[in-house]
Image (spheres, rainbow, N blue to C red):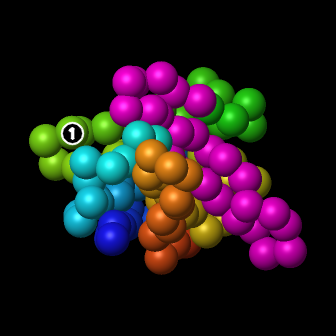
Amino acid sequence: QVQLVESGGGLVQAGGSLRLSCTASGRIFSLYNWGWYRQVPGKEVELVARVSIGGTTDVADSVKGRATISRDTAKNTVSLQMNSLKPEDTAVYYCNVVEYGGVQHWGQGTQVTVSS
């Protein structure tokens, strides 16, 4: 089993920055993909950014140039740094990890609200 603990959400003004972190515990050795997704009420979950165990990153066009995803393997943590935040970045952000074999695990979600 894999447990995920997220931190770093909150209220920020447009143009500001924030950093989300997610620490994993449990079957860490089985994980090959780490990422952040977000969801606005009434809309589907969308990818924000993800990083593979090999270091390959995938960043959504909507945040490209404003978001950086990174992993700290020693701390089993994946972080998302977001700059130049916009009101449309307001959402619940979820940490997601994927095991070899395709099993996914999700964090509890952290609210990010960007005020205009």
Report the residue at 57% width, 40% height from top. 49
In this orientation, which residue lies closer to the viewer: 54 or 21? 54
- What is the quadrant of residue 71 in the picture? top left
Asked whether 56 falls inside the magenta stretch, the response is yes
Q: Position of residue 108 (x, y in %)?
A: 48, 76
Vertical comparison of 21 with 16: above or below: below
Secondary structure beneath label 1: loop
Q: Position of residue 13 (x, y in %)?
A: 57, 57
Report the residue at 23% width, 39% height from top. 72
Q: Position of residue 31 (x, y in %)?
A: 37, 48
Taking the image as shown, residue 2 lies to the left or right of residue 115, namely: left
Res. 76 in view: yes
In the displayed orientation, state which residue is furthest to the left.
74
Vertical comparison of 76 with 22: above or below: above
Asked whether 6 falls inside the magenta stretch, the response is no
In this orientation, which residue lies closer to the viewer: 98 or 86? 98
| Mark 1 closeness class: few <14, some 14–19, many ≥20 residues within 10 Å | few
Residue at label 1? 73
Report the residue at 23% width, 64% height from top. 25
Taking the image as shown, residue 29 lies to the left or right of residue 62, namely: left
- What is the quadrant of residue 92 in the picture? bottom right
Q: Amino acid at mark 1?
A: Thr
Res. 87 in view: no
Taking the image as shown, residue 88 lies to the left or right of residue 52, namely: right
Report the residue at 44% width, 51% height from top. 99
Please state the extent of the stretch shown in magenta in the rendering: 35-58
Q: Position of residue 102 (x, y in %)?
A: 55, 52
Q: Quadrant of the C terminus?
A: bottom right
